[in-house]
Image (cartoon, rainbow, N blue to C red):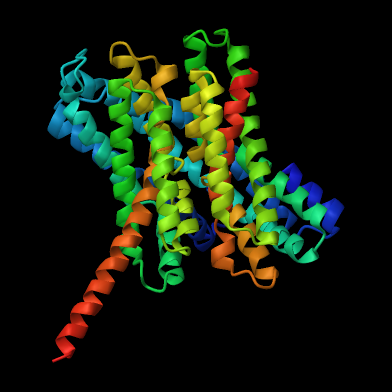
């Protein structure tokens, strides 16, 4: 706020239009942020934590075997998919993507690709928390796949794929997913919340990049195959 | 809102205002619906037990919806038009120093205000306090959370400076991103393991409600103002950089603290 005002006065030397609206908006921002933070403590954090604990208890409590936690994987996948498909920012980006790619990528297909990417990401992230395997290992492997894909993929899709990783996690989803990870890490024996609890958001941002580039390759391939099939029919 | 009891009521005015408030609430509510549906399904079908403290959670969710709506609405009527206009004006003005300075402060200011980042930083401080990574006092935790937020904010500012420079020079975005990845991998080897998870998460958290619209406006405005740059190709990529640099900076933060 102060920054914008400073630049407006010092550098651009233009008066601010609608001063009253700006002040009213600032009041909205303050009240809104306060309410949001209270709601965060009362609802979003407990929600994620309680789900993690109840589902862990359902899946055999203090078991060390990662196979015992089936419902947690299901919950992680469903929540990753559902929150992403409904994300307004993603809908806007996918429509733009449809334009840039000249129809090679459809808006709906892209949204599905991103949502499936997030679902896989969160599920794998939960698996990592349960098994307690080190996070850098997964992320580095993921980066290598992404770099390899970026080299092979059509150039237009690359910046889009990277951006779609960033837009997937909305303000409401982030606290719930963070609390889910921390709740899991504190419930499962032998996991430290500080070492194992974080990282779910990182997975949710990395996997859409892969799935979007993968989707672009697959849809390109299907289109070419369809075209070739059509040509064969025309030939005789 | 207080309804005027004895003064002449203006029903249309009130009606319009209530409708505007409801409209912004539905936007935030839409973010929340999938979570509610999924959680409700698992509670009823799988767990078959009542949710603990359901009343408090419901009240809290209402707070979240109303708070986030007011927050976004406030930004939309005041800061967004201002920021977008300025991003555009700076892009056209042509002074490189002023543009880069503006890019830095835009990234910094929007990230400090990001609600999702406030949430994660608070959680990280709480966990770090309980684990004995920092001393478990209110002051130490607030300090830690604030430092974490400032680190991320500086890194987003740096990302925008780099990204704007990239758009001006027309460098391909992959080199920067691949270079960044290599740096992340190398730094992960040195950083204390306690910070790694938080660092990776902060990359995804930064680009949210406040940052994305303003950053996108800057990128697209800039790419449109410079000849030979297509808005869609060069305008993108700022967000990708803004989610990469926080990882590097927070890892560095872990090395220093």
Q: Which residue shows up at 29% across the image and 48% down it?
A: A116
On screen, A91 above or below A6? below
- Residue A14 image offset from top left, x and y in percent: 83, 60
Q: Is residue B71 visible?
A: no
Q: How many marks?
A: 0
Q: Quadrant of residue A78?
A: top left
B222 or B78, nearer to the observer: B222
- Residue B217 image offset from top left, x and y in percent: 61, 59
B141 or A150, nearer to the observer: A150
B20 or A46, nearer to the observer: A46
Quarter the C terminus of chain A occupies: bottom left
Q: Which residue shows up at 22% across the image and 21% down it?
A: A56
Q: Quadrant of residue A66?
A: top left
- Residue A173 image offset from top left, x and y in percent: 40, 39
- Residue B132 image offset from top left, x and y in percent: 51, 7
Image side of residue B238 versus residue B131, left or right: right
Q: Is residue B160 visible?
A: yes
Q: Which residue shows up at 58% across the image and 29% down it?
A: B250
Image side of residue A82 versus residue B60, left or right: left
On screen, B128 above or below B61? above
Q: Which residue shows up at 22% across the image and 24% down it?
A: A55
On screen, B223 above or below B128? below
């Amino acid at each position: 706020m102060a920054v914008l005002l400073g630049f407006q006065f010092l550098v651009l030397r233009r008066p601010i239009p609608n001063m009253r609206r700006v002040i009213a908006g600032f009041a909205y921002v303050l009240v809104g942020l306060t309410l949001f933070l209270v709601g965060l403590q009362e609802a979003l954090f407990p929600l994620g934590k309680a789900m993690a604990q109840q589902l862990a208890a359902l899946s055999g409590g203090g078991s060390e075997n990662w196979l015992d936690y089936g419902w947690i994987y299901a919950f992680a996948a469903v929540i990753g998919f559902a929150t992403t498909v409904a994300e307004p920012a993603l809908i806007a980006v996918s429509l733009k993507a449809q334009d840039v790619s000249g129809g090679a990528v459809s808006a709906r297909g892209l949204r599905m690709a991103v949502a499936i990417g997030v679902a896989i990401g969160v599920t794998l992230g939960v698996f990592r928390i349960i098994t307690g395997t080190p996070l850098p290992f997964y992320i580095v492997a993921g980066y290598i796949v992404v770099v390899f894909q970026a080299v092979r993929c059509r150039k237009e899709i690359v910046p889009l794929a990277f951006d779609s990783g960033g837009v997937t996690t909305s303000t409401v989803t982030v606290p719930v997913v963070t609390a889910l990870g921390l709740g899991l890490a504190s419930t499962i024996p032998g996991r430290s919340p500080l070492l194992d609890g974080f990282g779910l958001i990182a997975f949710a941002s990395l996997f859409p990049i892969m799935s979007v580039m993968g989707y672009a390759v697959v849809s390109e391939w299907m289109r070419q195959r369809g075209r070739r099939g059509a040509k064969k029919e025309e030939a005789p | 809102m207080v309804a005027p009891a004895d003064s002449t009521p203006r029903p249309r005015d009130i009606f319009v205002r209530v409708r505007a408030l409801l409209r912004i609430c539905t936007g935030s509510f839409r973010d929340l619906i999938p979570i509610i549906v999924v959680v409700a399904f698992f509670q009823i079908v799988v767990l078959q037990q009542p949710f603990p403290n359901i009343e408090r959670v419901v009240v809290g969710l209402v707070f979240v919806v109303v708070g986030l709506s007011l927050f976004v609405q406030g930004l939309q009527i005041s800061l967004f038009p201002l920021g977008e206009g300025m991003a555009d004006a700076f892009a056209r003005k042509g002074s490189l120093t002023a543009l880069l300075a503006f890019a830095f402060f835009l990234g910094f200011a929007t990230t400090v205000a990001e609600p999702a980042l406030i949430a994660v930083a608070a959680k990280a401080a709480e966990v770090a306090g309980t684990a004995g990574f920092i001393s478990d006092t209110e002051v130490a935790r607030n300090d830690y959370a604030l430092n974490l937020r400032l680190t991320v904010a500086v890194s987003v500012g740096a990302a925008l400076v780099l990204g704007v420079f990239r758009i001006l020079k027309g460098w391909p975005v992959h080199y920067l991103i691949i270079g960044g990845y290599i740096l992340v991998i190398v730094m992960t080897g040195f950083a204390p393991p306690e910070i790694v998870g938080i660092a990776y998460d902060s990359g995804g958290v930064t680009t949210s409600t406040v940052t994305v619209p303003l950053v996108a406006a800057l990128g697209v405005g800039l790419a449109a103002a410079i000849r030979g740059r297509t808005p869609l190709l060069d305008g993108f990529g700022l967000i990708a950089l803004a989610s990469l640099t926080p990882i590097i900076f927070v890892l560095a933060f872990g090395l220093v603290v």
